[in-house]
Amino acid sequence: MLFSTCRSKGRFRISLFALAASLCCLWLTAPSFGQQVAPQAPAGAGGETAKPDIAKAKAIGTRPAEPPAVLQQLNSAIEQLTARISPAVVQILVTGYGALEENSRGQTALITREHAIGSGVILDPDGYIMTNAHVVEGAQRIHVTLPTASVDFPDQILPVGKQRIVEARLIGLHKETDLALLKVEQTGLPTLSLGSHRPVHQGQLVFALGSPEGLENSVTMGVVSSVARQADPSRPMVYIQTDAPINPGNSGGPLVDTDGYVVGINTFILSAAGGSEGLGFAIPARIVSFVYQSLRKYGHVHRIEVKAGAQTITDTLAKGLGLAQNWGVVIDDVIPGGPAEAAGLKIGDIVVRADGRLIGTLPAFTGALYLHPLDEVLKLEVLRGSERKTLFIAALEMKDPMDALPDLANPRDNLVSRLGILALTLDDQLRSMLDTLRNPSGVVVVARVANFMSSATGLQTGDVIHSVNQTSIDSLSSLRAALKQIRPHDSVVLQVERGGGLQWLAFEME
């Protein structure tokens, strides 16, 4: 049975390659059409093919036959595409701190400096680079290795000392989509375009670029296995699935179509052994474009709300409520005085389309709201009984309490220059705006200074600093006093509270 399965896979690959070659032949101008076929060796008596002159073959040596023109065209097309897109793909080098793997009891609770490698794609010639949030989250320092010209022979590889490695600044990250935006102080960089409005089809050829296992500027080829794979049914995120080989280090690199457009950002793989098993997943370009524009403009992602709730329709729910269908999404709440009520939305309405997109599941509806621009009206088509209605709902920005914190601080009074942050002493007003704190005293980070490499500390907006090198912090003045005792290049360990949990951030003072 195993042998039979392998054989069937082999046939599939051969037929797929033949199909890919045919597609590329149609994509390019195809001079091979109408070419003459090389003459066959003359047939002998009885129709038998004449035997080759073995002695003559030995004299001239063996030489591979000339490949078919269609394969030459496919090879040339891939080479040209790779040469065009690889200059806009970068390697990302991240330095941080983490727990040391415990090999003995004496190493318990030790932390060590860690290094990680990921990939990114340049979207703007002035140095804006998109990557995965998990690549740079918690980084103390971020460097980007800018690509060099591709080479044909090993002796042309650029020496390490001549590589262009520049420091990068984190503009913002968004954990829900696993995307982050970096900025390097460079101009005139090569870029790739996001194919956010280009359709993606199952079976189409795609190329993954990045630094798998740290091997910079690697390219692999495959097809789109699925155009919309939902990894977690409870979340609205969908991914492009591909069999193009993706390994650790490819995270943040682009998935590119045959026209050179970015159709997705590679983000994770499903693997039992840790390597590529043909199950790679990329964030669709439409989502990447939305998050990129938001992070670049605001530093965070705006989300909308319409003051209404929805839930998945089940067979039992449909029978109990007498709904017109036993699948889809039904409105279960309309908040009085909200934009949904003003537009005429009612409890029991079945959502059919949102902004022209068919809605069949709750994650699809949540995703449509997620990608809706803040400054546009939401077009909602609903089924009410047997009647279809089209509603236009004014979108409201979903407010995060953390968004209001920077307005409470000013650079003159709240700057902590040695950490590159704006901070506030915790008081009753701030505590009411934050989640329940494990420790009610401390200093909350409300902003990071843009022209200071504050990523070197690992601090994030919303962090509450409770101690510096085991010295308790209860106010902005006590934080400044503790930092004043620290000399350049001394080790610093901050105890911070983030997301309801305590952790240490360790770094060297600049």
Image (cartoon, rainbow, N blue to C red):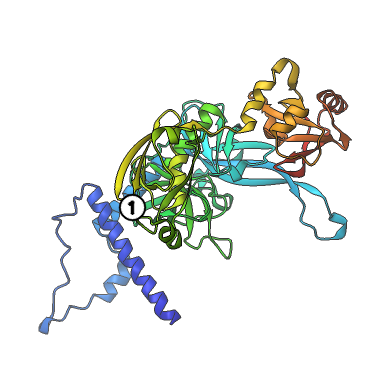
Dot 1, crowdedness within 10 Å: few (<14), some or many (≥20)?
A: some
Residue 223 spot, x, y in % from top left: 38, 56
The quadrant the C terminus occupies is top right
Residue 143 spot, x, y in % from top left: 62, 36
Question: Which image quadrant for residue 299?
Answer: top right
Q: Is residue 124 above or below residue 249?
A: above
In the picture as drawn, the residue positioned furthest to the left comes out as 46
Question: Which is more toward the observer, 423 or 280?
Answer: 423
Q: Is residue 284 visible?
A: no
Q: Secondary structure under badge 1?
A: loop
In the picture as drawn, the residue positioned furthest to the top comes out as 412
**In the drawing, does residue 138 fall left or right of residue 368?**
right
Residue highlighted by disc 1: 201
**In the drawing, does residue 306 fall left or right of residue 36?**
right
* Identity, as a three-letter code, of the amino acid under mark 1: His
Q: Is residue 323 above or below residue 495?
A: below
Q: Is residue 383 above or below residue 20?
A: above
**In the drawing, does residue 81 fall left or right of residue 293?**
left
Q: Is residue 231 above or below residue 47?
A: above
Question: Which is more toward the observer, 147 or 481?
Answer: 481
Q: Residue at x 83, y 26 (%)?
A: 475
Question: Which is more toward the observer, 422 or 96?
Answer: 422
